[in-house]
Amino acid sequence: MKKRVPHAMSIIGYIVSIPVFCDSGFVILSPLNKALTKRAGLSLAVTAVALSTGLYATHTLVPPTPGPIAAAANLNADLGLVIMLGLIASIPAALAGLYYALKVGSKIYIEPDIEESYEELMQKYGKLPPARWAFAPLVVPIILIVLKSIADFPSHPFGEGMLKSFFDFIGHPITALLLGVLLSFKLVDKLDEHVYGPKGWVAEGLKNAAIIILITGAGGSFGYVLRQTGIGDYIGTTLSSYHLGLLLPFLIAALLKTAQGSSTVAIITTSALLSPLLESLGLASPYGRALTVLAIGAGSMVVSHANDSYFWVVTQFSNMDVTQGYKLQTIATFVEGVVAAVVILIMGAILL
């Protein structure tokens, strides 16, 4: 069972990063990862890369993470469809990252330096909430958003009356995510200053949200400026003859990601840039728009290196030097992004 620790960390990262920035997720999960790695007698290189790639898969492909949800808005893509297809595409991507961690990470031994053992961590946090309440804030909003998309299918599986209106309301992203926030309060024993005080959960969440809103706004503004320069029409005219299809959003996002470091900025900027090009690229259908969001997300994985804050979070919290970081984190994200792109291209060949 100890050999399954990397698999467990990959799965945990995959789930946690759906609503949370991968940087924050890695920092939060790092003590647990080190404690389990020490207990299993494994190299931290293996479990750190398994965790980082698990987090990365859903961070770039599955709303309601800020990047994909903003891209879906920019491209007018059905959010429920993006979630459903994103969950499918992100599984092979996460498995590719896990495979790379097991094959390459096992050749590099990094000692996990732990301040607290697994038993001490459990004692520190005391009684943990039941699993159903721990997963509810993550899973319930996703289910509601997906149900809204199903309700809006042309076949009207829930009819056209009150039931459809109910799912349209409860499954709207704002309503669903607000419900997720309310469900998260069930994870604490009592509502006190640790929850709503000046330095509590709510205040910390608002502070983090402000940064996300700033990044989203700046990325969208930059994309709008690029569109006003006419570069979008030029790219569409120049590249439409090459029939790149879904490969074009992947390549543009990969170039922006590699150049400036932030996956979220790469996703938002690329989606704003490509918004007027969907017709000429043959991607204006509902499936085309959803798959374009995912192709952009796959491109935003390629690659995490020295100008990416996530690269430094993973390396510094995992005791990697820069050379090890490039060999482990950078190449792992390249493999993960390429695998995700291949899966999305296959989905496009089937659905478009």
Image (cartoon, rainbow, N blue to C red):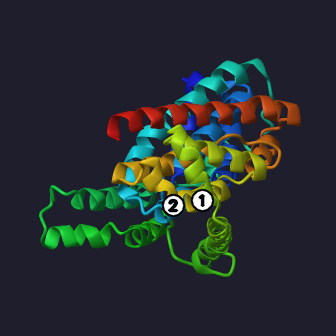
On the rendered structure, is 136 left or right of 214?
left
What's the residue at 63%, 51% (across, down)?
A: 22
Camera-side residue of 8 and 241: 241
Q: Earlier in the sequence, mark 1 or mark 2?
A: 1
| Distance (Cα) linking label 1 and label 2 | 9 Å
Tell me the SS state at disc 2. Answer: helix
Counting every numbered tag in the picture gives 2
In terms of image quadrants, where is residue 146?
bottom left
- Above or below for 350 versus 155: above
Q: Position of residue 227 (x, y in %)?
A: 62, 66
Residue that badge 1 annotates: 232
Residue 43 marker: none
Crowd rating for badge 2 (residues with CA inside 10 Å; few <14, some 14–19, many 20+)? many
Kind of residue at badge 2: Ser
Q: Position of residue 333 (x, y in %)?
A: 66, 36
Tell me the SS state at disc 1. Answer: helix
- Above or below for 193 versus 61: below
Residue that badge 2 annotates: 275
Q: Position of residue 121 (x, y in %)?
A: 66, 47
Camera-side residue of 339 and 99: 339
- Above or below for 251 versus 19: above
- Cβ–Cβ below 8 Å for labels 1 and 2? yes
Residue 13 seen? no
What's the residue at 19%, 57% (across, down)?
A: 154
Tell me the mark number nearer the camera, choosing from 1 and 2: 1
On the rendered structure, is 276 left or right of 264?
left
Kind of residue at badge 1: Gly
In terms of image quadrants, where is residue 316?
top right
Q: Position of residue 85 (x, y in %)?
A: 40, 45
